[in-house]
């Protein structure tokens, strides 16, 4: 595989994996091509020498391993780790609110993002939603909107004259709600 194809595969994976749940689903789809077997962590495992296995927890974590051909004491083991989450903004429960003619979504900071990089750019939504169905069972679905939906506007310079000297400072509770739309005036 050429370097260009490897880069394209990585970009395709990133585009398909905007949340930990999407990333795990993307990885699991790739494992099928290599005959990996899914294990249930609540059941007893019968691992075969040279067997390829994986375990998923909460649809947001995946552990993949290959059992060696020789006893562990002879060969040892290797572990490679990565994480599927990244710093960002997560929608709070009951997040929608109307204010100053705008429909806004309240968010919380997840991880350690550079919040200023979220301003004045198109933002979208992706993740997992859970709800109760007609039988009162909890159902979870992955969602990914492939178009801009939200905005975190920066203030005009005359409203924040010190921004160039002091940098952008946002109050996480009051100034982070994302703009979803303009509210229609009631007639």
Image: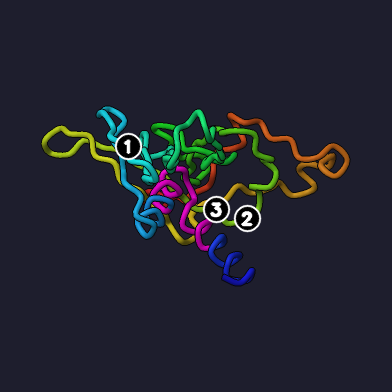
- 11 sits to left or right of 138: right
Q: Which residue is mark 1?
A: 47
* Distance from the alpha carbon under mark 2 to that under mark 3: 6 Å
Q: In front of the other: label 2 or label 1?
A: 1
State whether residue 4 appears in this view: yes
Q: Answer with mark 2 or mark 1, whichever residue precedes in sequence.
A: 1
- Quarter holding the N terminus is bottom right
**Main secondary structure found in the magenta portion:** helix
Q: Quadrant of residue 113?
A: top right
Q: Which residue is mark 2?
A: 121
Outermost residue, left side: 135
Tell me the tag on residue 170: none
Q: Between residue 153 and residue 122, name the one nearer to us.
A: 122
Which residue is identified by label 3?
123
Mark 2 touching mark 3, by CB under 8 A? yes
Question: Which residue is nearer to you in this view: 123 or 7?
Answer: 7
Residue at image coords 54%, 39%: 83
Q: Nearer the viewer, mark 1 or mark 3?
A: 1
Label 1 vs label 3: CA separation?
44 Å
Pointer 1 and pointer 3: residues touching (CB < 8 Å)?
Answer: no
Residue 177: percent from left, percent from top: 54, 39
Relative placement, left or right, of 131 versus 49 is left
Cα–Cα gap, marks 2 and 1: 49 Å
**Is 120 displayed left or right of 145 in the figure?**
right
Q: Which residues are magenta?
A: 12-26
Magenta run includes residue 116:
no
Q: Which callout, 1 or 3, points at the residue further toward the start of the chain?
A: 1
Question: Is 122 placed above or below 111 here?
Answer: below
């Amino acid at each position: 595989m050429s370097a260009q194809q490897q880069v394209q595969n990585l970009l395709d994976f990133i585009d398909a994996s905007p949340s930990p749940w999407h990333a795990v689903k993307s990885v699991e789809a790739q494992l099928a091509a290599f005959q990996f077997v899914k294990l249930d962590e609540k059941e007893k495992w019968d691992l075969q020498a040279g067997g390829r296995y994986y375990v998923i927890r909460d649809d947001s974590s995946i552990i993949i391993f290959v059992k060696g051909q020789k006893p562990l004491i002879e060969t040892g083991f290797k572990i490679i780790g990565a994480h599927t989450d990244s710093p960002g903004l997560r929608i709070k429960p009951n997040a929608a609110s109307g204010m100053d003619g705008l429909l806004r979504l309240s968010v919380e900071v997840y991880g350690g993002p550079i919040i200023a990089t979220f301003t004045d750019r198109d933002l979208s939504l992706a993740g997992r939603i859970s709800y109760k169905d007609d039988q009162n069972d909890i159902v979870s679905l992955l969602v990914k909107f492939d178009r801009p939906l939200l905005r975190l506007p920066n203030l005009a310079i005359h409203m924040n004259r010190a921004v160039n000297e002091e940098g952008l400072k946002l109050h996480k509770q009051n100034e982070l709600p994302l703009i979803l739309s303009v509210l229609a005036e009631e007639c």
